[in-house]
Amino acid sequence: MATVEYRNIAKNFGHVEVMKDVSFGIADREFVVLLGPSGCGKTTLLRMTAGLESVTNGDLLIGDRRVNDVHPRDRDIAMVFQNYALYPTMKVFDNIGFSLEVAKVPKAEIRKKVEWAAEILNLTPYLGRYPKELSGGQRQRVAMGRAMVRNAAVFLFDEPLSNLDAKLRTHMRVEIRQLHNRLGTTTIYVTHDQIEAMTMADKIVLMHAGRIMQIGTPDEVYERPNSKYVADFIGSPSMNFIAGAVETAGGSPHFVAEGVSIGLSPEIKAKPGQKVIMGVRPHDLGISDAGEIKGEVVLSETTGADVQIHLRVAGYDAVAVVPRDERRNAGAAINLSVLPGKVHLFDAATELRVA
Amino acid sequence: MNGSFSTRMLRTIAAWVVVAVFFFPIYYWTSVAFKHGNDIFNRPPKLIAFTPTFDNFQKVFGISLGSGGITVTPGGGNFYMAPRVWDSIVIATLSTVLAVAIATLAAYALSRMNFRGRHSFVGWVLSTRMMPPVAVAVPMFFIYKNFGLIDTYTGMVLIHALMNLPLAVLLMKSFFDDIPSEIDESAIVDGASRFMIFRRIVLPMAKGGIAATAVLCFIFSWTEFLFALTLTTTSVKTVPVVSSTFVTSIGTAWGNMAALGAASIIPAFIFILLVQKHLVRGLTMGSLKQ
């Protein structure tokens, strides 16, 4: 078990700077998800942690040890790759036990450990098979078994579920999280899928263009995104945004845009006249005749329990998620109100959170 | 895919026609090896109706078919070629092993490791095949003469391996490039050393590539003529070189030449049979999600 710490990490590929001044810490036994779009640097950061990429600048600590120049095999980490990277010429047993064999662990002990991992991962009947004889989910579990037997201090997962179909992905998500609860190994998990991040993480590190945008628990990142970028990235469907300004009306602050006027909490930090972008999550909109937001229904999509209503509001596209019995037909006029305390305001220039 | 009966029939016939076109010269050449001198020049040629004889093989290989079965009488004569076939086998096999061994190591390094000039390296390797071999035949002769390599197995093995290396390296590199680097990385994290990764993981995966490369190297060496002619004199000679000696001042011994040619297909054929089961194999074989 171990902590991981990044201190002012920078990474250049040739003359291209892909990461700059990344600093954060991961507590022992924590499940941290590095989340972001492709090219944001999350996989690079993970590969630097594994030792597969060099660190251009800064300090990388696993436990109390600076590991910048430590060989991957001596970092006490185990890694699961996106495409599993199983050894095709070895059977499942040898795939799982390879790291132990390399470390010259006695045969009996290898057998014990491999069987232990196989038991947990439901792979016992497949130990004598080759990877090509397994399904996608089974291969994924073999890759996890390989990591498990090593007794590593840190597990690194590089988008391990992105090659699985939707149903299996949901299933494996639960399995990985249960495995973590059982083993308690510090885990760094890279994904671009915000639902994976929200469901699995103790802590989300949201990255964009080689920088950290926000660090927090899933609730914090969802409830109080610190920038428009984070607000937009987290949540499905994504947050609705309308540009406008803060104005004082009747002694209390209001968000005002064309055809929209929403009362804000009096403690708001925004100054009157400040240009802002208002964000409201689709789930935080409700249909009400007295609603401050007037729009026109473009399309209703039933997703199961809910209906996603796509609308035009003040020249913007917006989405509201309402219970299925409240669906509206295209072309209907609709009034929506925002649930109390669910308005997010971002400065129009900096796009950082004001309230 | 299967189509109607007539389509399938047509496809089968077309396939057999193609096979026949390619097989006919081999059949004709082999039949010449079993003909008496008179039958060889018959017009129209006797394709099937000729009296077979073993004389040509007896003269070239010292093998005769008598009442007591096959008897081998190694023995003299200018046209006794059995040792030359042996020379060819030794040279082709050893040069193939040497070329494949070096090419595999070099190609793995080129495919996986970062070093200065790595990208231009491939161009340099290939450039050695850009000039016609005959341009270096004379310099090679003098180099070989000074090193005492003329007319030796060592010399022939070296030159054939040398000539095969560029293509073998490129070929092997493309096979290694197809093996995802994540597999190497996974093994690195697992604690394996570079050489261990190469030996235990990458090499077994590249079996198909090695087989294909070996086949090409073997066939090249088996049929190479120029250097086999210029760098040997009497003690080491390969089949292509001695084939030319059947053309003499008093005429060409077609029957004997055909016997040697037909027989020399056999070792190459056996070699290819041995490696062909590795030739067409899925490369990554389920290690990755495709």
Image: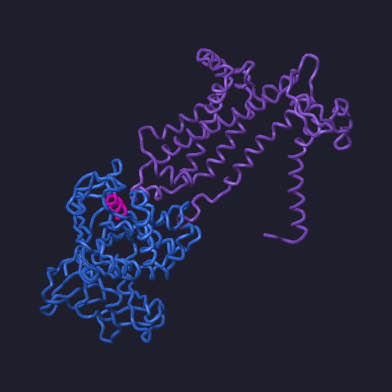
Chain colours: A blue, B purple
Locate residue A295, reporting x and y percent.
32, 78
Residue A208 shown left or right of residue B229 in the figure: left
Q: Is residue B153 above or below residue A115?
A: above
* Residue in the foreground of this view, choosing between B227 and B51: B51
Residue A83 counted in the magenta span: no
Figure check: A270 above or below B106: below
Prevalent SS, magenta region:
helix
In the depicted view, which residue is nearer to us: A192 or B165?
B165
Which quadrant would the N terminus of chain B be assigned to in this image? bottom right
Is there any visible trace of residue A349 in the rendered image? no
Q: Horizontal placement of B243 versus A194: left or right?
A: right
Residue A227 screen position, x and y as percent: 22, 64
In the rendered image, the vertical position of residue A260 relative to residue A214, given as above or below: below
Drawn side of residue B45 relative to residue A236, left or right: right
Q: How many marks?
A: 0
Visible in this render: residue B273?
A: yes
Q: Position of residue B191 (x, y in %)?
A: 33, 48
Query: Which picture quadrant has residue B261?
Result: top right
The residues colored magenta run: A40-50
